[in-house]
Image: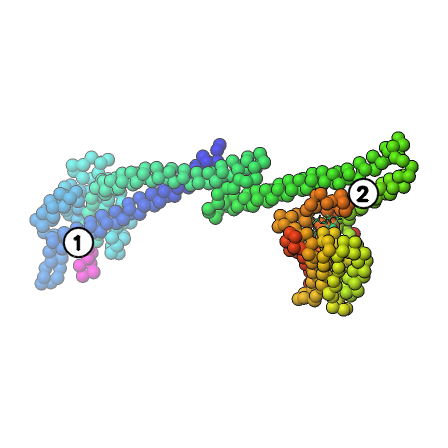
Amino acid sequence: MKLLYRLMIAFFTVIITLMTVLRLAFINVTNETMYRNTWNQLKTYSDSLVQDAIRYDTFDHTFKGFENQALLSNAALLSNQHVHFAIFDMTQRQTFASNGFAPQISKNDWKKLKKGKTIYLRLTRPQINNQKAHQSAMTEVIRPYFYHKKMIAVVSIATFVSVVEENMHQLKINLAIAFLIATLAALLISYLLARSITKKIDQLRTATRQVAKGNYHVKVPVNGKDEVDDLARSFNQMTTALRESDQEIRRQEERRRKFLADAAHEMRTPLTTINGLLEGLRYDAIPKEDWNHSIELMQNDTQRLIRLVNDNLDYEKIRTNQISMDRKLFDCSAVLTNLKEQLNKRAAEKEDRIQLDVPAGLLVYADYDRFVQIMFNVIQNAIQFTSNGLIKISARRVERGCKFKISDNGIGMTNDQVKNIWERFYKADQSRSNQYGESGLGLPIVHELVNLHGGKVTVESKPKKGTTFTIFLPDPQHAPHRNSQN
Ligand SMILES: Nc1ncnc2c1ncn2[C@@H]1O[C@H](COP(=O)(O)OP(=O)(O)OP(=O)(O)O)[C@@H](O)[C@H]1O
Ligand SMILES: [Mg+2]
């Protein structure tokens, strides 16, 4: 059975049960109250008729009996209201009956009466002259009367149950109508309640199907706080997570595809050169005097290929945290001075000048070899892309670490180019690549290495004005707690 119907039945059953119980309780209480009211009224009638008809001897204070005329007129008056009464004396003899009303009083009741108790009978069938027995169900009050502590009479007064029941009947009709209206309302309410729940489940079901089809952009509206809303909220979190991982997978796939294409592209040039030269040698197309030069060219390209492979492996290792890092504090001014010496020759080739501005004994916290690798790559780039210029290397102690600046006044880069320099194989100017044999792996490696040290590398550049790389390396207490991992 559909959940909607099941929920509806459940709600409906609860509401109807509740209403039935309430209805029964109400009828019961009302019934009781009605009888109580009737009995009170009968009691009042009885008291007033006794007061009206009783006769005493005022002289010796003795009870003289009831005046018949007064009783008759009361009987006539009360019978108009379907009330009948009978009077008994102390010997249990009936001394008066209105309209032939002949109630029975049991021995037990007499005992109670003698003690002054009033007796209330819900349903009796006393003899009454003009009523058939089965129609004359009555409710009766039997009440004793005392004079100077002596019981003088007992009045039994009764009215037809039908009078009470008539009122009750009207009430029951009203209740039935109310019950009918309430049932319809209950039906509607249970439908609305059940629908509000199943609607949310339907939305979730539709959304789940969408997700199964690979659409991770679906969102289920959440505007409540119940369990189904919680489920919807979790569902939305799940689709967000799925969307993100899907995007990540696509990104990875794209990166892999790009890497393969770029790597193949990078390798094609040296391999083609080597292949061409080998063919030339094989078919004697290269004169003997050029052999040495050809071999030299092949060796260059082979070395380039080896570097390409090594750099890639290095990059992958750094990126996946597979390198060992031995960080310690050392004097970076010495290292940078050393590097300057090494690169001076290359700078001279490009008619560049290197200027070093590092406080003596400046301590940096890093892995020595990796620090050299970072600086070498960046300074080498500066030389590579600057002709007849000035390359400034400065280092300073700053809050929480050391800051290095390598700036040149070379060809610089546009903003778009700057955005891509951390990508593998990216070269801002493709036409230059062959000239220098560079492969666009230097900066991605720098980036990963600086990250691994818990540092930061940024770049500012303007075309034809120059480029500045800023590298921050944190002090031991601010560096990530990881010294080596293999
Ligand atoms: N100082 C600089 N001035 C101008 N452009 C630069 C500078 N440094 C880097 N670039 C640009 O960023 C690109 C990427 O640099 P990266 O060091 O990663 O590769 P590469 O130097 O081309 O090759 P490799 O370093 O692998 O030999 C360079 O090709 C160049 O276009
Ligand atoms: Mg480089």
User: Up-down: is 180 above or below 85?
Assistant: above
Query: Residue 315 in magenta?
Result: no
Give me the residue at 41% from left, 37% from top. Answer: 191
In this rendering, does residue 56 appear at all? yes
Q: Is residue 154 above or below residue 357?
A: above
| Residue at the spot 77% in from the left edge and 47% down from the top edge | 436
Is residue 175 rendered to the left or right of residue 375?
left
Q: Which residue is mark 1?
A: 47
Where is residue 76 drawn, in percent x and y?
11, 44
Q: Nearer the viewer, residue 313 or 59?
A: 313
Q: Which residue is depicted at the point 33% across and 43% down?
A: 23
Question: What is the quadrant of residue 252 in the picture?
Answer: top right
Q: In terms of depth relative to the viewer, which is nearer, 190 or 230?
A: 230
- What is the chief secondary structure element of the magenta stretch? strand
Does any atom of ligand 1 lie closer than 8 Å to the CB of label 2? no
> Mark 2 belongs to which amino acid?
Leu
The residue beneath circle 2 is: 305
The outermost residue toward the right is 288
Answer few, some or many: residues within 10 Å of disc 2's Cα (few below 14, many 20 plus, some between 14 and 19): many
Q: Which residues are magenta?
A: 145-151
**Residue 420: image location, x then y, percent:** 66, 47
Q: Position of residue 427 (x, y in %)?
A: 70, 46
